[in-house]
Amino acid sequence: MRLVTSALILVLLSPMAFATKLYRFNVDGQQVIKDHVPPEYAQMGYEVLNTQGFVIKRVERAPTAAEIAAVAAKKAIEKARLERIRDRRKADQALLRVYSKPADVERARQRKIDNIDGYIGLQQRRIINLTETLERAQGQAANYERSGSDIPAALRLEIAQLQNQIRESHENIKVRKAEKIDSTKVFAAEYSRMQILMRYPPGTLESEIPLEEAP
């Protein structure tokens, strides 16, 4: 609460002294006191004074377009953050239904890799066997050609099927090797996340974890 200034005393001696409230605001750096707030100044903010000259209310100035935009942007950022937390929590809860600790992830990864390696080994042995069979069939076909005879249709079909099966096995190996790489990345991410979940609640964003505590 401030005492009535000399300027206000002069005002109170004027007809405005009969007003139940006075309004004080700034215009171009100059303090103005009136018994009303002109519409053109209403957005600038003002103080309401009682008849004793004490401030009984402060009305903040209206925000600028830039300030309104900044507030909207801040709200949008926070909304996006909350949505990320919600999605992260959902994923974390699903992860915790599968694993109870990081070591569980490593065991699952090893089982997966062993399974893929086993499959690739089988396909490689299949290729060796098919290749040997193909070479024998191609040898028979060569004998027919050397003797001037036509290669039997059944032998031609067998050779074509063997070649297709070999190509198929090579493609299977290629697919499983890619799966091995992808699985390794997934398990690595899950292992890292489980390390975080051992210290923080589900939904914690990695960007909000102190760098010195990040896995």
Image (cartoon, grey):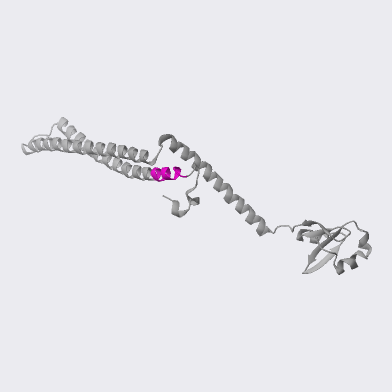
Going 57% across and 51% down the picture, which residue do you hit?
77
Q: Is residue 131 left or right of residue 107?
A: left
Looking at the image, residue 142 lies above or below residue 36: above
Going 15% across and 32% down the picture, which residue do you hit?
155
In front here: 66 or 56?
56
**Residue 179's quadrant in the figure?**
top left
Looking at the image, residue 178 lies above or below residue 28: above
The part of the chain drawn in magenta is 189-199
Question: Which of the image's four quarters has the N terminus?
Answer: bottom right
Going 9% across and 35% down the picture, which residue do you hit?
140
Q: Is residue 155 left or right of residue 84?
A: left
Residue 61 among magenta residues: no
Q: Please tell me how many numbered marks the rendered image carries.
A: 0
In front here: 14 or 72?
14
The main secondary structure of the magenta stretch is helix
Judged from this view, the residue extending furthest toward the left is 147
Going 16% across and 30% down the picture, which residue do you hit?
154
Q: Is residue 28 left or right of residue 83?
A: right
Spot occupied by residue 88 in the image (x, y as percentages of width and height): 49, 43
Spot occupied by residue 190 in the image (x, y as percentages of width and height): 40, 43
In front here: 133 or 187?
187
Spot occupied by residue 105 in the image (x, y as percentages of width and height): 37, 40
Spot occupied by residue 47 in the image (x, y as percentages of width and height): 80, 59
